Amino acid sequence: MEKSKILVIEDDGGIRTQMKWALNNEYDVLLAENTEEAIKLLTRFSPPLVTLDLGLPPDPEGTDEGFRLLQEILKMSPFTKVIIVTGNPEKEAPLRAVSMGAHDFFEKPINLEELKAVVKRANYVQGLEKKNKELLVQLKTESNRDIIGSSREMHEIFTAIRKVSTTDVPVLVTGESGTGKELVARAIHLQSRLGNGPFIPINCGAIPEKLMESELFGHEKGAYTGAHVQRKGKLELADNGTVFLDEIGDLPLPLQVKLLRVLQDHKLERVGGREMIDLDVRFLAATNKDPEELVRNGMFREDLYYRLAVVTIKTPALRERGEDILVLAKYFLKKHGGANEKIRKLGEDAVQAMKKYSWPGNVRELENKIQRAIAFAEGRQISASDLGLPASTDEFSLNLKKAKERLEMEYIKMALVKCDGNISHASKEMGLTRPTLHGLMKKYDITTKEMQNVDTEA
């Protein structure tokens, strides 16, 4: 492993030799006795560590030259860890240096063990900061490439992803359906220490309750009728990686107890098993419901909620993201329009319609409408009618009847999105019979396809 470079800036030849002897085994030591030599070595080698004697020529008894060089070093390389060496028992100068950006200080005569400890600590901190900087660059260029947006709300999301990705804490992602919760979870996973491991998504609302326990925890051969072979569950398959529990609010209460135990102990037991299996898994979860309301209503365990929601990230609704709507529309047009080269751009009426529309299905609905428009468009531009949107919302404000119809249509779409296109669930949610909802959907030309979950959230 390559040694870290350290530049020792010291005008006393004896002390320079002493420090080189003390550090030479663990570091690649560079030596400078004045500002000119120091600048040359800093420019050529960019050492991450520097020890700096404030008393340098032409004023070895003062500190002006040392402070000037400190400013120059931090200007050239803000991440360099500068350790101040002082022969003055007064603490005023080194404390001022620390306030300017120096990492630490120690006094002459030099205690070699203290010197080694201070340098080792500075090297460790510098390494962490360098890794975090590299992760940030990678995060911007790789993990976020499918999360499109430049609004303030999305910048806050990017910042949150960057901060939590370098920790192992559980994260709960909340937000309406179609806002990109899984993409946020994937971005966090890719930048975590387990980023090279598996990412296992589990939709807690899509698996029948009777199968959920085996799906999560696996089972042993003969654990129940039909269990002909041993089978690992998804939690075990996520070992050395990340498990993403989507729609965690739909997890049955008995399984919430078992999941809580896994979060606490990092161990699981298969159904019908007697052996505890160690797990190294990062837990990420998501819900489109209000988790605190679920807790108040007794539908979700409070202790599990606090275990999963160490950090909470709320994905914004598309209607809250301003110009991101057009940015995303153009992205999806480019993504899906390759096979239809006649499509070139969005017409002005389409742009205005998208800005006025409330987007109850969020980014997922926008992508589906762009795909629809590509199929329906006859010219080189996409129109509002190609998107299935009114050219102007003014037509709905002409009379009370049309305003009511507009509200009714939006409400039906929101219910269908919430229930992932399941008509039975949506009709119960709205207090309607299934035939009545079918009739309203036919009236407003609403299909379940555009309201269902798709893989390409953004």
Image (tube, helix red, strand yellow):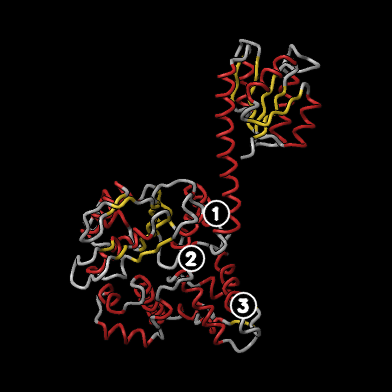
**Image point (28%, 56%), residue name:** 293
Judge from the rendering whether residue 326 lies leftward or rightward of residue 75; answer left or right. left
Relative height, residue 234 to residue 401 (above, below): above
Residue type at the position of mark 2: Arg
Q: Earlier in the sequence, mark 3 or mark 1?
A: 1
Q: In this view, does 49 lie above or below 113?
A: below
From this viewpoint, which residue is outermost toward the left? 225
Alpha-carbon distance for marks 3 and 2?
A: 19 Å
The residue where tag 1 is placed is 155
Secondary structure of the residue carrying numbered label 3: strand
First reached walking from the N terminus: tag 3 or tag 2: 2
- The residue to which callout 3 is attached is 346
Tell me the tag on residue 319. Answer: 2
What element does badge 1 sit on? helix
Identify the element where label 2 is drawn: helix
Q: Where is residue 36 in the image (x, y as percent from the top left)?
A: 81, 26
Compared with 93, 456 (above or below) is below
Q: Which numbered circle lies on residue 97?
A: none
Residue type at tag 3: Leu
Q: Earlier in the sequence, mark 2 or mark 1?
A: 1
> Can the viewer see residue 306 in this picture?
no
Determine the residue positioned at 61% across, 83% down.
Answer: 339
| Relative depth, front residue between 161 and 108 | 108
Closest to the camera, between mark 2 and mark 1, is 1
Residue in the image at 56% along x and 19% along y: 113
* In this picture, residue 237 sits left or right of residue 430: right
Q: Are marks 3 and 1 in contact (CB under 8 Å)?
A: no
